[in-house]
Amino acid sequence: MTAFPNLTGPGCEVPSTQSDLWIWLRGDKRGELVLMARSLEAELGDAFGLEHMVDGFRHDTGRDLTSYEDGTENPKGDDAINAAFATGGGEGLDGSSFVAVQQWVHDLGRFSSFDQQDRDNIIGRRLKDNVELEDAPASAHVKRTAQESFDPEAFVLRRSMTWADSSGEGLMFVAFGNSHDAFGAQMRRMVGLDDGIVDGLFRFSRPVTGSYYWCPPVVDGHLDLSRLGL
């Protein structure tokens, strides 16, 4: 387990805002989520102080607010399990997951000012059919993060959510892995540390938070915290 790295590339920065505890509440009834969050905050108040809370939501069938599909390249089935969960580490580690969480703020006005071809080239896919562009520029997000193009391959399982409030809107990026290595490799390439080419996403979006967490395994319906001596 390591702290989230602060990375700087040509004209872009990825901040580290490492926190100690991350709780993701999911549900269809917003009122119940608010009350659950208040209850947890009160229960943990003697040990933790609330630093940041984001109210995320699922947009359409799982699209980003740019209208492009999010997580198209997610592994499926056994490949997803192998990418997202640790194995071979022994009791208390096997079945756990390492997660990266970032809040990205989109400038949707700037994005909408680009013509459709430019938008497709930023993402690396056609909006109308979600087909990957073979002739997309090297800066296209799909090319920057092509998981099979890394050595070793850098597969993660994404479960991102859109967000919007009075401060703006964007994407809560959430990626689970069997370690933090795959996400770290992708992020370094995105900011141009591999070859000087910066991901096209930075033309209209920027991350404002960044934290790594460890999700303990679950045994018989309970968290296994033996690796923490608990």
Image (cartoon, rainbow, N blue to C red):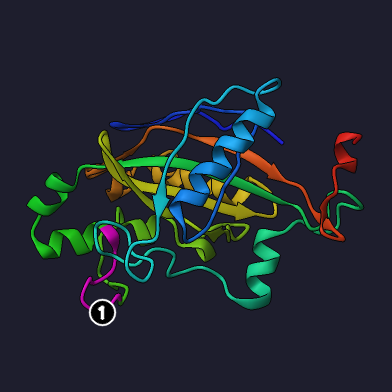
The residue range painted magenta reads 123-130
Q: Is residue 128 left or right of residue 179?
A: left
Could you tell me residue 78's position as x and y percent? 68, 75
Q: Is residue 44 magenta?
A: no
Indicate the quadrant where residue 45 lies: top right
**Identity of the residue drawn at 25% across and 63% down:** 67
Q: Is residue 204 above or below residue 126?
A: above
Indicate the quadrant where residue 229 lies: top right
**Dot 1 alpha-carbon crowd within 10 angstroms: few under 14, some 14 to 19, many 20 or more:** few
Which residue is labeled 1 in the image?
129
Could you tell me residue 222's position as x and y percent? 83, 53
User: Helix, strand, or loop for circle 1?
Assistant: loop
Q: Is residue 207 left or right of residue 26?
A: left
Total residue callouts: 1
Indicate the quadrant where residue 218 lies: bottom right
The kind of residue tagged 1 is Asp
**Identity of the residue drawn at 92% across and 52% down:** 91
**Identity of the residue drawn at 79% across and 53% down:** 217
Could you tell me residue 148's position as x and y percent? 53, 65
Quarter placement of the C terminus: top right
Quarter placement of the N terminus: top right
Q: Is residue 50 left or right of residue 83?
A: left
Q: Is residue 128 magenta?
A: yes
